[in-house]
Amino acid sequence: MSDTVDERVARVVFTADGLVAAIVQQWDTREVLMLGWMDAEALRRTLTSGRVTFWSRSRREYWRKGDTSGNIQLVRGARLDCDGDAILLEVDQVGPACHTGTRTCFDSDDLDPVAGPTRPLP
């Protein structure tokens, strides 16, 4: 890719608060691990360091996944969705992704939806 990091960051559609949702997925199994928020600087750091950096909305500071827990996220890919307002980060997750100590943040609260109809077979 010949675009500079700043040109890639400029393609992102940030919210009025200057943030974009970043969905984190294990690169090889496609397991969805967590969702975090990034501003332009957090995205820039992620794209240039090989480690995922987020913006903490509650603490109002940058945090790099794993700096205190050791459960790091090594970047394997980053893609922008078709509208430019969400990022998919493919990572190699070392240790649990969730701050509760579980592998994924999406394994604790099943909302028990009604399943849609099965698709007809061709």
Image (cartoon, rainbow, N blue to C red):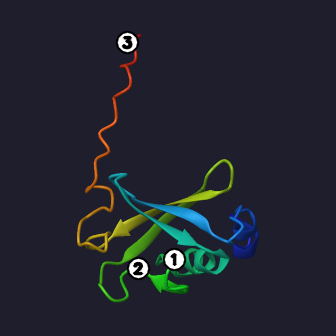
Is disc 1 surrounded by few (<14), some (14 to 19) or many (20+) residues within 10 Å?
many
What is the three-letter code of the residue carrying label 3? Leu
Q: Position of residue 30 (x, y in %)?
A: 37, 51
SS at mark 2?
loop
Of badges 1 and 3, the one in the foreground is 1
Above/below status of 91 relative to 120:
below
Check if mark 1's residue and mark 3's residue have beta carbons within 8 Å: no
Q: Earlier in the sequence, mark 3 or mark 2?
A: 2
- Which residue is at a point 35% across and 78% down the rendered structure image? 72
Quarter-wise, where is residue 7 in the image? bottom right
What is the three-letter code of the residue carrying label 1? Phe
Above/below status of 35 relative to 5:
above
Q: Earlier in the sequence, mark 1 or mark 2?
A: 1
Check if mark 1's residue and mark 2's residue have beta carbons within 8 Å: yes
In the image, 27 versus 97, the foreground residue is 97
Q: What is the CA distance from the residue labelled 1 to the residue labelled 3?
A: 43 Å
What is the three-letter code of the residue carrying label 2? Lys
Q: What is the CA distance from the residue labelled 1 to the residue labelled 2?
A: 8 Å
SS at mark 1?
strand
Q: What is the CA distance from the residue labelled 3 to the residue labelled 2?
A: 43 Å
What residue does disc 3 label? 121
In the image, 40 versus 109, the foreground residue is 109
Is disc 3 surrounded by few (<14), some (14 to 19) or many (20+) residues within 10 Å?
few
Check if mark 3's residue and mark 2's residue have beta carbons within 8 Å: no
Above/below status of 118 relative to 57:
above
What residue does disc 1 label? 54
- Which residue is at a point 68% across and 71% down the rendered structure image? 17
Q: Position of residue 51 (x, y in %)?
A: 46, 78
What residue does disc 2 label? 65
In the image, 102 versus 26, the foreground residue is 102
Residue 50 left/right relative to 6: left
Q: Earlier in the sequence, mark 1 or mark 3?
A: 1
